[in-house]
Amino acid sequence: MARVELEITRRQFLAAGVAGTALLGTGMGPGRSNMAMNYPDPPWFSQGDVVTTYNYCDMCPWKCGIAVQTVNGQVMKIDGNSLDPKSRGMLCGRGQAGVSFMNDPDRLQSPMIRTGERGEGKFREVSWEEALDYTAEKILAIKDTYGPEALAIFGHTTGDFWFTDYFAQAWGTPNAAKPSSSLCLSPRDEASTLTLGFPVGGHEPMDWDEIECITLIGSHIGEDSRNTVMQDFIESRSRGAQVIVVDPRFSSAAAKADHWLPIKPGTDTALLLAWINVLITEDRFDRSYIDEWATGLDELTTHIQEFTPEWAAGITDLSAEQIRTTARVMSDRLPQAAIMPGRHVTWYGNDSQRMRAVFILNSLLGVYGRHGGMYFNKSPFLDSYPHPPFAVTGSSGGCSAEPGEESAELPLGPTGKARADGARDTFLRGPTAMQELIDPMITDDPYRIAGLMIYGVNLLNSIPIPSRTIEALKKLDFVLAVDVLPQEHVAWADVVFPEATFLERYDELSTVPYKTPFIQMREPAVAPMYDTMPGWMMARELGLRVGLDAYFKWETIEEYLDIRLRSVGSSLEKMHDAGGVIIQEGKPYLDEFVADGESPFHTASGKIELSVAELAEAGLDAIPVYEPTEEPPDGYYRLLYGRNPLHTFAKTQNTPVLSDLSPENELWINEDEAAALGYVSGDKVWLENDNGDRSGPIAVKATQRIRKDAVFMAHGFGQNAEGLTLANGRGASDTKLMSRYKLDPISGGAGMRINFVRLVEGD
Amino acid sequence: MAYAFLLDMSRCIGCEACVVACKSGNQLPVDRQYIKLIEHTSGTFPDLTGGFQNHRCYHCADATCVAVCPTGALFKEDGLTRLNRDACSGCGYCVQSCPYEVPVMSDGRSSKCDACASNVGAGGSPWCVTTCPAQALKYGDRDEILAEAKERVVALKDRYPKAQVYGETQAGGLGLILVLPDDPETLDIPADPPATPVVVDAWKEVVQPLSMGATVLAAAGAGVLGIIARRNHMAELREVDDKKKAGVTAGDSDTEEV
């Protein structure tokens, strides 16, 4: 198949800007013409040459390798790339809707500068030159007045590298943050690093091929439709692996479980401690593995004595027998029995300790580096593009942080300021905590943050206490929003940069730590629609305007990518011809480390640390204890939230195909509770939290599938953005019902499952 | 050669990738879909079982929709129930008579899964099959698919004592062979769908082509209407039954479109 040649130079994009503007207002997205009334005749794949380009999907952060089919310059269909170790030729529903995401007629179509008050959403369309010059002028003024640290940069989705990592470090701000850290993964990755000496990494390294017992704690595979995980989970289970699911809700995964433990929300650590108690007191753990590879067994044994299944039964609402039985199911299969680390783990504010308990349990089962347990991820080898030393290092970190990056001293920006998020003071370690940068924007404490660049983060639908975020947005000197869609927060920006979607741009290579480390490419299937621009080009154009020329020596992105690929003997062309992926050798198992005379555990002791001295020194528990969580007041339910298989966070609710199939979320409530309140499925209600904040309307789903003390909804709905014609006002928002969160003292994660709601009649 | 789908409900995890793959591959407009997942739950908290009905065309060998279709828009080919939407007159008989309640009207014409006929004709596999992350779907020669379904059921008996193949004989043999972990009723699938009465075949194959007198047509037409009436009656009965059940044991059955 021929490759689409899309040389985009700076000169061309500036020229294209004029043509793009001329197209504005026609209202003709190519998507509409795709929607044939009957079968296309002939079918799309017979209408012309099918041109395949390779890409990694941006419909969720999992980044499946995809093959994009284009006919006559129109993207027709997206499939999983059969050579990609993550997609293996298959793809989830969201990935299948990538074409629809690109063709969304609500897309931002031109750069804009604000004309009305902030938040009014009034803008004038401007040229890219004007938008970039204006932005450069504003951020340089902030740098002159307050120093480069006063510019915060938030980023999410697969182009965030250019802003949150590359531009931020070149510019010199340590205040770059990603929601995937403190609003999601931080507790598990910090707990893993403290216990094992490495983070879990982007991809939970379950050794699915040989596993015999899978335990999920709150992970709802199937509703969370990460392609590879669904494939592996179902294949392992069909092969005969036992499945234990701990969830207050009878999720799709719980319906596949051999043992479902409908735990009382907030008590997971008690269950984990009781499981550890059974393994140790019944001598059912991998003693030789622990003797060789772990420290702290004596302390753990003493610590665990009181945490019996009977003790946990009273807390968790499970039976002691259930707890014992499931512990034995695991231990009978060790080391081919692992607890999946989970992803969104910012639940109750004690989350790093809960994750520590998970990793201690996994260690007792002897899973790390063992066949059928958990393998060791390895990052692929690939050189960086050569650049001068950064003005500040380690800005955002996040799930891609490499082992050992955390140092005792926080990196300082050019004027001597460290991160403003309270790291080392209110919490111990981990990447920059996004939600902790909001207060400094309002209070100027510890110093003023005057500017904010937002790349692809749905700001008001991801950070708890959105009213506080709006207060911060009002106080900033300058706000830039880079996005594909007119999301809610875009109305609060001074400048809007409309981005080309993943199907319309080259991008940084995706390097995937995995059992077989691999590299994925992104090449455009079509040229950018409207007057949009790829993120890399925005970052570069901005860099050239603020004196960062030395970091952007390359003329074209193709040059940048070719130079990087040269280090692995490849090039864009070679990589395309090889099917869009480069796979390297991993080092997944313990015996390979033993043979090399190395330890895979990069802790101070070089071993798994069941008891962590660093925590004790910081006045925290060296071994996890159970801390009770606040109970809902009378008449209120604990607000649980999660995923819908057809949506990603608050990103896809406006995608036409997905909105058509799944336009709103539903409120899961126990059927008996609903009946007592006089509701049946389909009734529309509003939700009100104990702070008086409201969101809705949302349809009731009265079901036996959930406990009586909690309600559940999919995250990402209930957006208030007039420009999103399909998503605006549909369903309820969990974020808008979060009037508080609890900071995890270890990782800086924001525990968000401490909010309570009741059902009320509509406005 | 007769083709068939294999749909292994012990594997389906309800991610709806098939639904979107079908929509995007067949370039279906807004409000049209050929696959719909319907969540089913039995029991009361915390003693529950549940799964998804993957609601789509069953490709019956004795397809009532084909029998009642007055224009030939619906026809059998290679074991599949094909639909030529251009030939559809929009009478809605297929919608009314399908024992599985599959076809729906969209833009005034019948609409249902065609096994990606244009794609399969080119030697490919239906879009839903190629994308399914749970690999719950397979497509191929019906004899081989049926044999594999039987093998899978044997392997499932440990975990699911009531595991069974569905579709070997129903409606003359289906082109959608299900591997079910439990009785079909738990997913609201009729164990034995009503067969197409002989009178319908007569109406379609003899009466219609010969354009016989109004009396005969009316009599045969009554047969078709009879099926429709009976189906509606069965639906009513089921509704009454559901309500009764709901009255006795709240939450015994919970059906939810997702």
Image: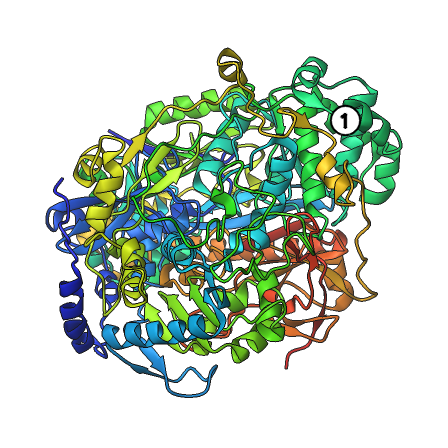
Colour scheme employed for the rendering of this structure: rainbow
Q: Is residue A681 visible?
A: yes
Which residue corresponds to the image point at 44% horizontal and 41% vertical from the top-left?
Answer: A227
Q: Quadrant of residue B134?
A: top left
Left-right relation of B50 to A310: left
Image position, residue A398 (x, y; %): 51, 48
Image position, residue A144 (x, y; %): 43, 73
- Local SS, label 1: helix
Q: Nearer the viewer, residue B57 or A718?
A: A718
Which residue corresponds to the image point at 50% horizontal and 44% vertical from the top-left?
Answer: A399
Image position, residue A195 (x, y; %): 65, 33
Tag count: 1
Q: Quadrant of residue A654?
A: bottom left
Note whether A604 is above or below A50 in the view shown.
above
Left-right relation of A197 to A383: right
| The residue positioned farthest toward the front in the image shown | A415
The chain letter for the residue carrying disc 1 is A
Looking at the rendering, in which quadrant would you find the N terminus of chain B?
A: top left
Left-right relation of A746 to B32: right
Image position, residue A257 (x, y; %): 63, 34
Question: Which residue in the structure is indicated by mark 1?
Answer: A325
Give the residue type at disc 1.
Answer: Thr
Q: Residues within 10 Å of mark 1 (few under 14, many from 20)?
A: some
Note whether A148 is above or below A592 in the view shown.
below
